[in-house]
Image (spheres, rainbow, N blue to C red):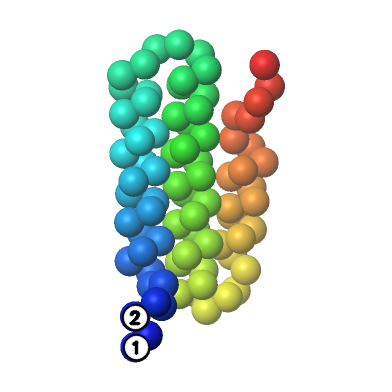
Amino acid sequence: MNALQITLNHYLALGAILFVLGLAGLLVCRDYITVMMSLELLFADAAINFAAFDHFLWHRQLLGPALGTVILVVSPGDTA
């Protein structure tokens, strides 16, 4: 196994970091911009996890990128 190979655990660790940052932003701050940015982090976490599971477990059935695209399209973007 190559030492520089990225595994599913790396993606899950990145997703966990994004989830914790997004959840902390939701719980700590109450202004509109910070809440929207925190929600974006939570949605980005879900999209990364779906894409990683698609690549490593679902063997590229394109379910992960499709769900990730739906999540990013429906997520609250910069609508201000």
Label number found at residue 1 = 1
What residue occupies the far top of the structure in this picture? Answer: 31
Q: Position of residue 9 (x, y in %)?
A: 33, 66
Q: Is residue 57 visible?
A: no
The residue depicted at 68 percent of the width and 22 percent of the height is: 79
Q: Secondary structure at mark 2?
A: loop
Can see residue 11? Answer: yes
Amino acid type indicated by mark 2: Ala
Identify which amino acid the numbered label 1 is placed on.
Answer: Met
* Side of 29 where 47 appears, left or right: right
Q: How many marks?
A: 2
Residue drawn at 63 percent across, 30 percent down: 77
| Helix, strand or loop at mark 1 | loop
Residue 59 is situated, as x and y percent measured from the top left of the image, at 52, 79
* Residue 26 on image: x %, y %: 37, 24
Check residue 16 in the rendering and tell me which mark sits there, or answer none.
Answer: none
Please identify the quadrant where the N terminus is shown: bottom left
Would you identify the image quadrant in which residue 56 lies? Answer: bottom left
Residue at the front extreme?
A: 4
- 79 versus 64 height, above or below: above
Q: Is 43 located above or below residue 64 in the figure?
A: above
Q: CA distance from mark 1 to mark 2?
A: 6 Å
